Image: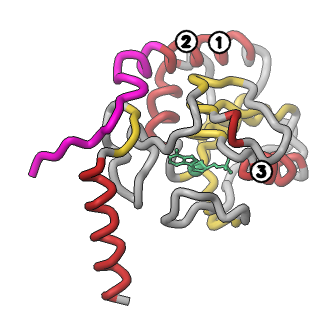
Amino acid sequence: MTIEYFEEVLLTQEQIEKRVRELAEQISRDYRDGELILVGVLRGAVIFLADLVRWITLDVKVDFIDVSSYGYQTETSGIVKIEQDISLDVEGKDVLLVEDIIDTGLTWSYLREYFQSKNPRTLKICSLLDKPSRRRVEIYGDYVGFTIPDRFVMGYGLDCCGFFRNLTAIGTPSQEVWELTRRWNEEEQANE
Ligand code: IMP
Ligand code: MG
């Protein structure tokens, strides 16, 4: 079945590719003298991290942390929970968190404090997207790919109801997508 996924495409595959390379170049320059560990925030950042790391020209390590805050709604619950921690020791290392999007800022503000307690040498965040108009805490991204308006988006790692992470562009879900996800949610609830 083919459906129209996006109501509006905000970022094309080409725009994303170009910007990811620029970020990787900047990171490669900035971390020349350290021991960089990229920590991807699951699951939204997986695609971004996979592309980003291939353009980084340093010897880096990669780890992941799994946090949940959104569930299956499009509004954050405000409660951040660590589902699975990193496995590398980051003490004395340069930690760069890799996120798909900074929205309310609650996840990054929570993770910043959490990682700070592991005593890294430096701690920064690289987020592909930033929605500054939605902030609930005063916080900013150190490396940001694109600043976007207050719209719910999917694609390139970002999900809508757990699906559509595999789309190569980023945009707002179409009416068809909303109807599909509503039906899937109903079916899931019926099976519980
Ligand atoms: P924050 O804690 O509100 O900053 O939200 C961070 C997380 O919410 C991101 O890592 C995403 O997983 C999710 N999120 C925020 N906005 C969107 C969106 O527009 N589409 C999909 N996921 C989003
Ligand atoms: Mg996320």
Q: Residue at x 58, y 38 (%)?
A: 150
In the rendering, at what x and y percent does residue 21 appear? 50, 15
Say the numbered circle drawn on residue 3.
none
Q: Which residue is mark 3?
A: 111
- Mark 1 vs 2: CB contact within 8 A: yes
Q: Amino acid at mark 2?
A: Glu
Residue 142 rendering spot, x and y as whole percentages: 75, 26
| Residue receiving disc 2 | 22
Q: Amino acid at mark 1?
A: Gln
- Secondary element at tag 3: helix
Q: Quadrant of residue 178?
A: bottom left
Quadrant into which the C terminus falls: bottom left
Colour setting:
secondary structure
Residue 38 coordinates in the image, percent (x, y): 64, 36
- SS category of the residue bearing label 1: helix
- What is the crowding at mark 1: few (fewer than 14 residues within 10 Å), some, or many (at least 20)? few
Return the disc, 2 or 3, that comes first in the chain's sequence: 2
For residue 101: magenta?
A: no
Q: Which residues are magenta?
A: 1-18
Dot 3, how many residues are within 10 Å of its Cα: few (below 14), some (14-19), or many (20+)? some
Q: Which residue has dot 1 on it? A: 26
